Amino acid sequence: MTSFVLLFSIVVFSQSKIYMTADKMHMFLGGIDALDKYMEEQISKFEIEDSLRDATSFTVYVTFEKDGSISKAVCFDSTGSPYEKEAITIIKNMPNWTPAEIDNEPVRIMISLPVHFNYVSLQNTDAEFPGGEEALIQFLKDNLNYPPKAKKKEIQGRVFVNFIIETDGSITNKQILRGIGYGCDEEALRVVNEMPPWIPGMIKSRKVRVKTTFPVSFKLQQAYVDIHETYLEADYMPYMYGGQVELDNYLLKNLTYPPQAEKEDISGTVGLTFVIERDGVVSKVFVEDSLGYGCDEEAVRVVSNMPPWIPGSISDVPVRVMLSMAIDFPPPLSYADKMPEFPGGANELINYLARNLNYPIEAKENGIQGKVWIDFIVEKDGTITHIKVTSGIGGGCDQEALRVINNMPKWTPGIHNGKTVRVLYNLPINFLLQ
């Protein structure tokens, strides 16, 4: 499911005030899932030329009237892309939303909606090297050379290469995510460049672009590995496709609050252990720390149904690895009747950022600017937890954004159905050179 982040701003016109938040927030008819479906249906009509892929993501600022209709839609940071007009049209053609309300009266409100034509999936969509895993291993054996400098210095490890598998199977946007140097990074890129076209990924019978992280191993010696053993540690531990961000998104989308626990207002953590098999499948899910009231069963259900992970390995041999995970209840909401608020409101949040945000020297010297997107959870007592960067720009900006968020005071918590709730919040931190 595509995650749509609602960004709010206050704008005051002479005829009527436009609010950033309200007692009862506006909503697309049918909710977030219906909004996702609408956007996917509209965007799927477009075929994007390769030369335009970097200019097909837009942030559209939308003004909603008191009846829920859209009166204005404009692109922020216009790029002049030929798809900009289409993005605005998609937004303007939306049906009326349920209007926002303050003191039971409808109000005008402004939000921003992202429109991404160049959809790249982070899911496991069965994109595959031709001939499968065995053919891929053989390709690497036949083509990978150990750089003499690395061999002399006894350098070994994994080079992680990011790339996109296009809808025709070709590989683009190749870059080193994490390297080990001494010529190994360049050799890994060379081998990836020589790969034949892959079998493209599919979602709902439609070919999609797939972003993947591919490890290229450089190992001087082979150690004995028992493939039937279950390990607690490995050279490379298992991880979900797309990393921690995708795992968090999976839990947010699939974890539900059991009715019995909700009735008793139960909160806490279920501690689980599970095994990632050699093929990445999740197995042997056990409850180590129980919470009860249906939460244990729900935690086991969600973890058991996770899609396959990238398995762990020792000396390049996939192995079974046992992991542990803590599942929090109640799960955070992505939307509440009344969203959490920085103390004093949006203006105070802006003032806080202006007072505390420092522009990193490295970013200044290299002309780096843009938005760092931060996810965090506003707990029921207003504290900020689970803070992480979901989209960064580097140059020290990601770390600075995290520092400022970590130092925030408690927020006013969100309220849903009359109850205080945990809410997942997504906040952009702007770094702009003057």
Image (spheres, rainbow, N blue to C red):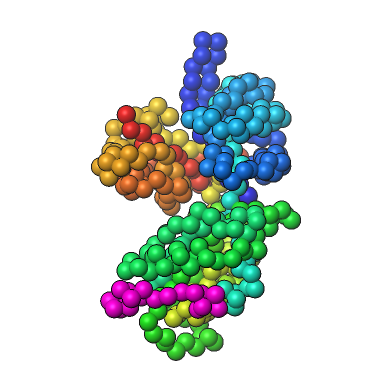
Residue at the (41%, 35%) spot, across then down:
342
* Residue 328 position within the rendered picture, expressed as x and y whole percent measured from the top left: 51, 58
274, 295: nearer the viewer:
274
311, 422: nearer the viewer:
311
Q: Residue furthest left?
A: 361
Which quadrant: the C terminus?
A: top left
* Residue 187 position within the rendered picture, expressed as x and y whole percent measured from the top left: 41, 68
Q: Which residues are magenta?
A: 138-156
Residue at the (55%, 10%) spot, across then down:
15
* Residue 41 position within the rendered picture, expressed as x and y whole percent measured from the top left: 71, 42
Residue 99, compared with residue 160, is above or below; it is: above
Q: Is residue 97 visible?
A: no
- Total marks drawn? 0
- Reply yes or no: does residue 182 show up in magenta: no
Residue at the (52%, 17%) spot, across then down:
17
Residue 111, compared with residue 405, is above or below; it is: above
245, 135: nearer the viewer:
135
231, 269: nearer the viewer:
231
**In the displayed structure, does residue 342 sit left or right of residue 414?**
left
